[in-house]
Image (spheres, rainbow, N blue to C red):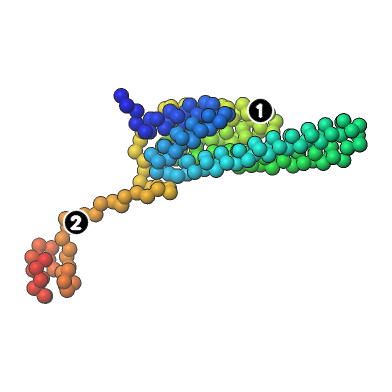
């Protein structure tokens, strides 16, 4: 039996959540969430994830750059037998600043991811995503002491379970960022006013009593 776009999207997002720590996992989640966003007609499910990915990439670059500057400063001070101590201190300070900014951007990235899962829980009715989003957010904050990575991993595992068990329910009428067709109007009801002169007429009248126009 051919899988629907909904089934494909949730499977891709589920697999991506299991390996979210890698580039492939991130791409799979993005593709899956794009399909779910279109299914539920809610751009919050996907757009925030894109912003989160952008913040995460910038954060990674800053952290790597900061560590490189820090190690370069320490190495310079060591090989110059202390003569480059000023350069070493500058490297350490620069590395710490880059690390702090990178950490803040990483938190912003995870905040966007959390909001995406919250929106998906709201639209799909699958409360598992609320649990996953909270664990991912708490884990992101606690990464500074190491245990946060494990908590985030648990959060993405729970999110994967949510994707694999997600039901194809009809989306609600309210949309966020997508246009929807207006409800059909009832054209079978006859007006109680003459279209020519506007005079009130009986519902079953065939001619206007005022101007004689046929209804």
Secondary structure under tag 1 reads: helix
Q: Quadrant of the C terminus?
A: bottom left
**Where is residue 157 drawn, in percent x and y?**
52, 26
Residue beneath the point at 36% across and 41% down: 171
First of labels 2, 1 by sequence position: 1
Secondary structure under tag 2 reads: loop
Quarter holding residue 169: top left
Quarter holding residue 188: bottom left
Q: Is residue 14 above or below residue 175?
A: above
Residue beneath the point at 36% across and 43% down: 172
Label 2 sits on residue: 187
Label 1 sits on residue: 147
Report the side of 139 relative to 200 (left or right). Answer: right
**Where is residue 127 drawn, in percent x and y?**
46, 34
Report the side of 124 relative to 88 (left or right). Answer: left
How many neighbours does mark 2 have within 10 angstroms: few (below 14), some (14-19), or many (20 or more)? few
**Where is residue 153 drawn, in percent x and y?**
58, 27
Query: Toward the viewer: 118 or 70?
Result: 70
How many neighbours does mark 1 have within 10 angstroms: few (below 14), some (14-19), or many (20 or more)? few
Residue beneath the point at 52% across and 40% down: 49
């Amino acid at each position: 039996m051919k899988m629907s776009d909904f089934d494909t999207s949730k499977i891709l997002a589920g697999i991506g959540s299991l390996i979210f720590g890698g580039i492939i996992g991130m791409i799979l989640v993005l593709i899956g969430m794009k399909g779910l966003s279109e299914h539920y007609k809610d751009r919050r499910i996907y757009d925030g994830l894109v912003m989160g990915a952008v913040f995460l990439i910038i954060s990674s670059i800053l952290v790597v750059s900061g560590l490189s500057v820090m190690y370069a400063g320490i190495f310079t001070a060591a090989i110059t037998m202390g003569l480059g101590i000023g350069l070493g201190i500058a490297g350490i300070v620069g590395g710490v600043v880059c690390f702090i900014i990178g950490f803040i951007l990483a938190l912003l990235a995870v905040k966007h991811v959390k909001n995406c899962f919250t929106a998906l829980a709201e639209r799909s009715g699958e409360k598992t995503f609320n649990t996953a989003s909270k664990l991912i957010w708490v884990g992101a904050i606690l990464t500074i002491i190491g245990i946060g990575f494990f908590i985030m991993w648990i959060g993405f595992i729970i999110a994967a379970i949510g994707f694999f068990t997600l039901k194809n329910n009809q989306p609600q009428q309210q949309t966020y960022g997508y246009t929807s067709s207006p409800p059909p109007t009832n054209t079978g009801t006859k007006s109680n006013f003459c279209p020519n002169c506007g005079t009130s007429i009986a519902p079953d009248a065939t001619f206007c009593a005022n101007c004689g126009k046929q209804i």
